[in-house]
Image (cartoon, rainbow, N blue to C red):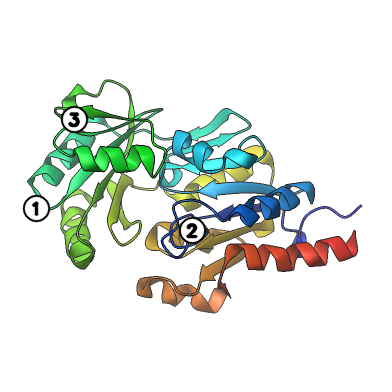
Amino acid sequence: MATGLEGNIRLVATDLDGTLLIGGRNLPRPEAFAVIERVCDAGALFMAASGRQYASLRHLFEPVADRIGYLCENGGEVVWQGETLVRHTMPRELALDICHLIDETPGAAYVLSGERHAYASEKTPELIEHMRTAKGYDISAVSRPEDVREALIKVSFTVDPERNEQVREMFADCFGRDCEVVTSGAEWIDVIMRGVNKGSAIRELGEVLGIDLADMAAFGDAENDRQMLEAVGHPYLMDPCFDTMLDLAPRCRRAKTVEEELERLLAKFEKRA
């Protein structure tokens, strides 16, 4: 029986917001889970690749939670079959400095990602409730970031979409020597250790699982997907995507929806099988 999708694709990774989740959706369409099941049945691994935490992603993909892998925190952590295969933490003082600057930035509010839990300021109850109910986050309120005791992976923060690039550049100027500062959706900016991203994580995962990058496919739309799309042999750039990603268009296949493209790949697999 044939295994793997078209072009010997053995692993499929997809971003969420603006990629698998389009049109403002908070959850995948019900039919997406059936497609994911079929990808797994075809012998390919399916990875949710997101800036979100592990608990949130398991909640989001509950119908297939035990069949897929999770590339979390924009590459800060990768979990497969319940085992953490990749994890990169951030120096505590650096994370605290980032949170302090966020607190000083008008209209911004942080979410601090630990190894298993997330934290936000008690001054932002609406953000905490949104992350808990809409995103499925395991999140707690703290009076100050110093109150967090576990190891830290990433700092994310909300920002006015019209000021996203301006604020991102400001944080890159302050922390760019040590950190990657990337847009993660119109209202979000992620700050993670330099050299840690979805691309580095998928490389590390491939080494652990023995899967060549040439045999991986990935879907993305924003700057936090760039390194992942540059790394894999079968990159898919969403249409539409962020304008800053259009330079990747020549090496990427364009996709309207992840499900539609996976259906196309599955049809070819099922014909071979």
**SS at badge 2:** loop
Q: Quadrant of the C terminus?
A: bottom right
Camera-near label (2 vs 3) is 2
Say which residue label 1 marks: 106
Instruction: Kindly identify which residue carries mark 3.
Output: 145
In which image quadrant can residue 253 be found?
bottom right
**Can you identify the residue that label 2 sits on?**
21
Seen at 68% across and 62% down, the residue is 262
Residue 211 visible within the image: yes
**Mark closest to the chain's N terminus, 2 or 3:** 2
In whole angstroms, how far apart are the C-alphas of marks 2 and 1? 28 Å
201 relative to 273, above or below: above
Mark 2 Cα within 10 Å, few/some/many (few <14, many 20+)?
some
Q: Secondary structure at mark 3?
A: helix
- Residue 177 visible? The answer is no
Give coordinates of residue 147: x percent, y percent. Answer: 19, 22
- Residue 200's x, y, as percent? 48, 48
Q: Going by the picture, which residue comes out furthest to the bottom?
A: 250
- Left or right relative to 185: residue 83: right
Q: As shown in the figure, which amino acid type bears the numbered disc 1?
A: Pro
